[in-house]
Amino acid sequence: MPPPIKDHLPLKPVDLEILLALADGDLHGYGLVQAVATHTDGLVTLDPGNLYRVIKRLLETGLVTEAGKKASADAAGERRKYYALTPLGGQVLSAELERLRRLVNATATRAVARKLAQ
Amino acid sequence: MTRTFRLLIALFPRHFRETYGADMQDVFRDQLTAARASRTWTAVPVLWARTALRMTGAAMREHRSGHPFLRGSAMMDFFHYDLRFTGRALARTPLFTAITIGAIAIGIGAVATIFSSLNALVLRPIPGTTDGHELFTIDRRTEDHSEGVSASGALYQHIRTATRALDDVAVWSRVQLSMATGEHNLAVNGAIVSSNYFETLGIRPATGRFFTHDESIPVVVISHGLWIRHFAGLDNVGGRIITLNGRPYTVIGVAPEGFRGVFTPLRMDAWVPLSAQPHVRPGRDLAHAPWLWMFGRVSDGIAPDQARAELTTILRAWTTSDGADEYKQYTVFRFTPLTGLPDDARRALLGFGGLLLGAAVLVLIVAGANVSTLLAMRATARRHEMGLRTALGAGRGQLVRQLLTETLVLFLAGAAGGLLLAWAGTSALEQLKLPGDAGLMLELSPDLRVVGVTAAIGLLAGLVFGLGPALRGTTHNPALLIRSATAGSGTRRSFATSALIVGQLAASLVLLSTTTLFVRAIAHGSTIDPGFDRENVAFMPFNTESFGYDADRSAAFYSTLHTRVKELGGVTDLAYGQAGSLLAQTSGGAVTITRAEGDERLRVEQTLVGEGYFRTLGIPLIEGRGFDAREMAADVAVVSETFAARAWPDRRQVTGLTFRREDRTVTVVGVAREVKFGDLDDPATPFVYLPLRANQMNQILFVRTAPGTARMETAIGVIIRDIDAAVPVPTMFLLSEESALALLPQRVAAMVTSVLGGGALLLACAGLYGAIAFLVAARTREIGVRMALGATPRDVVQLFLSDGLRLTGVGVAIGLAGSIGAAQLVSGFLLGGDAFDPASFGIAALFLITVATLATFAPARRAAGVDPCNSLRGRVSLHHSICWSFFQHGDHGSP
């Protein structure tokens, strides 16, 4: 029996970024680096070591799976290993996004945001 | 990029890097491509720096996550706290860090360079072999091991079938081959080997296969180098036909990269099986003549001594049963590890290398002592910090651990720098011109063993030289430390510091005087008269066997060559021979002198010489004459003075007398003056010159030219090509240059000891300078008091100068004693020069004293510039604060 979805929550920021990137479609390692960089306006640039530590963790928890080797369009057609979101990964991602949405929309959060903005 | 990046990947746990290593490389390659495309010049370096830092961190975390028990353990504390703190501490004093690491790198680099060379030449097993420690050279020797003989084919076959203690035995011998490559032939160093040669070594082919026991057609295995150079590394090289010595051979395989046969200084390019002997060594008797070198693999669980005993028993039984064996006096075998060098050369090199290693260790001691002094001063400068940390609750153990960590990090960084120096040093040594063969080539670069030993030396040196300062730096109680740290009054040079500086000076002096000894030996060596005239003689070695000639064709070739070269302008004399330089190989043998009171056996060195040989080489004949053209097949000989004196001590004239050699009666026709073939300090051995038969396949052509004549290499090359266009033209050597190489050991020793001595002196003087400068800085207040009480600047200079000179004096005294001892050790290499050479020692000592005085004078003069008012008010000079900040963290403030 796999651990329930809420055991995966909250997601680490990097994990969330990776899962978000994969929600748009399968990606290889460098594709993930690029997607995360674009999505965070260059705030998060992953190095290969930390990238694969995250991937290893996501593979172990079953949120991500390997999607086989494919020729990549942006690396001169070299064959790269692609990663895909698992159904569980999708559920965890949507649960996390829902949690974040509720956090952002909560009355208390808004009050704090208003106060800080002044 | 890949190699550097792979280093980063290697930091990760094995499982992780095996799973993701290749993917990480892909990602980084893409990132690099993108960075390069970005047109910002900082993009690539920034990416490298960021990636290196983050990958290191990621690797650490990955290690930790794999071992939950490491979390919070002392080990992780070490990595997380001590290492990080050390990094910060060292980064704050960059000059100190750089100088310290540099000094250690010099010391460790010296040791690593010499050790790496020794390791490559005599210690490591032949590259590519499996279980190299089981392989042994098997030498047939006389009972007392003084003389040896190679194995015959028959003996080899017998041993191979009879032995139980050896897994396998193989034999080899050198052959000169020439390979057809279009127009001209290429001279190739080859070996003729038993079919199990590669199997016994445990070598796997790079491609193709090695020999089987029954090759039906002529086959050859080629070296990796030849494969790349001439077949562009093609996969399907097997089955290709190449022409060797005029006959087609089928290439069946390629030896692995870096494999050079079992005599590693010589680049070997082709191996043919024993079945090729009638073609490549036509004159040889495969069954009975001893010309094969034997080596074997000792079986598991059998000691080499057991195997040797077994083989000796087999040999004794065989010599008594086989009547054909003429070498009955060679009754035992000697086993020596198969390391790519013959045993004698190996021993000589070990002895020589051991001396150089000793010199390098002296440099390491100097460097270590130097750094130890620096560390002690740093500890003094940091007493305030240490006191503060103790007061805040740090245990002494913690502080010592912190200081030791710093020291070890410094020494390990130094070891890494030393390894880099060793790469550079060994490649410099590889450039040395070696005597003789053009195919000789050294490969000395460090391997994994050297890296390991270097790291171990770094750690050991760190403990030896770092433990003292670490312990001393934390001894005192915090209150004392904090108080005394303000403007070090009463800082005296401690006994330990003095001892370290004296030690450095003494060790430098030992190295310097040894250098002087070697330089004087070289000067002495070049004046030794070798007995022949080295000037204006060139020589060219030929081996017509490798041209694919038979005896008749060979004789015709030599005869035509002689006639044509004689006609060249500038040639005054020429002759054939088989030896003629200081590095010549002559062969040992024995003759029998018949006397009234009984026969006497005389051990001699012998060589074959042709007509005109003595004239060409300028060897004076004291009595009689040289050989003339008609007696080249006769039983005549020219003997050396020593021979005449030993054989017939009571005869004033010996021409016409006879001796017996190999069952023939030989008549003496002349007596030649003593020459030194081989070694310069060779004691005179009885020497016999025998006529060189016209059908001899390998001959050396000696050509004497009129002074001022240009090199004849091209002219003779044209003649050779004219006689036979396919023949490879041999390299021409000048006798003067070749003979100069006889001083190679002395030159190498002088070069190495002078570099080491220079480095050591530099370190020692830097140490002396630093110590005095530090004392000046630490005693500023005292100087101020002295000057306020009436001391002149001169008095102050004198105070420090005499301090430095006292140290120098003690160092010189100890160094001279050490030099005398070291001279005894190197006396074997001084070519008969006196090891106790007061002039050499005097020159070295004088030089050291001069340099040391200068090193003391500079900081001492600065002391005289102290302003008493400022120093008493606690204001410090710029020099003082620089000196202080050199050792201390910025944020703890200077006193």
Image (spheres, rainbow, N blue to C red):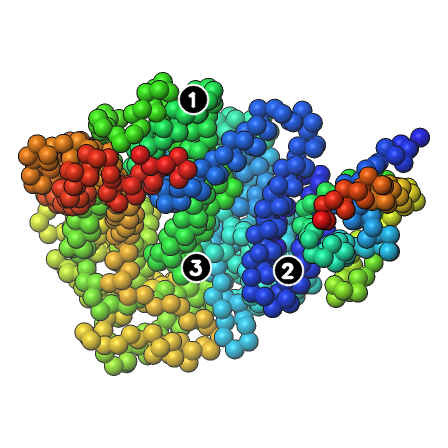
The residue that disc 1 covers is B390
Alpha-carbon distance for marks 2 and 3? 43 Å
Indicate the secondary structure of the residue bearing disc 2.
helix
State whether residue B405 appears in this view: yes
Alpha-carbon distance for marks 1 and 2? 48 Å
Indicate the secondary structure of the residue bearing disc 1.
helix
Question: Are marks 3 and 1 in one subunit?
Answer: yes
Q: Position of residue B423 (x, y in %)?
A: 44, 50
The foreground one among B632 and B744 is B744
Question: Are marks 2 and 3 in one subunit?
Answer: yes
The foreground one among B501 and B180 is B501
- The disc, 1 or 2, on the residue closer to the chain's N-terminal end is 2
Chain for numbered disc 3:
B
The residue that disc 2 covers is B32
Q: Which mark is residue B298?
A: none
- The disc, 2 or 3, on the residue closer to the chain's N-terminal end is 2
In the image, residue B743 sits, relative to residue B707, either above or below, namely above
Amino acid type of the residue that numbered disc 2 sits on in the rendered structure: Leu
The residue that disc 3 covers is B439
Q: Position of residue A102 (x, y in %)?
A: 87, 42
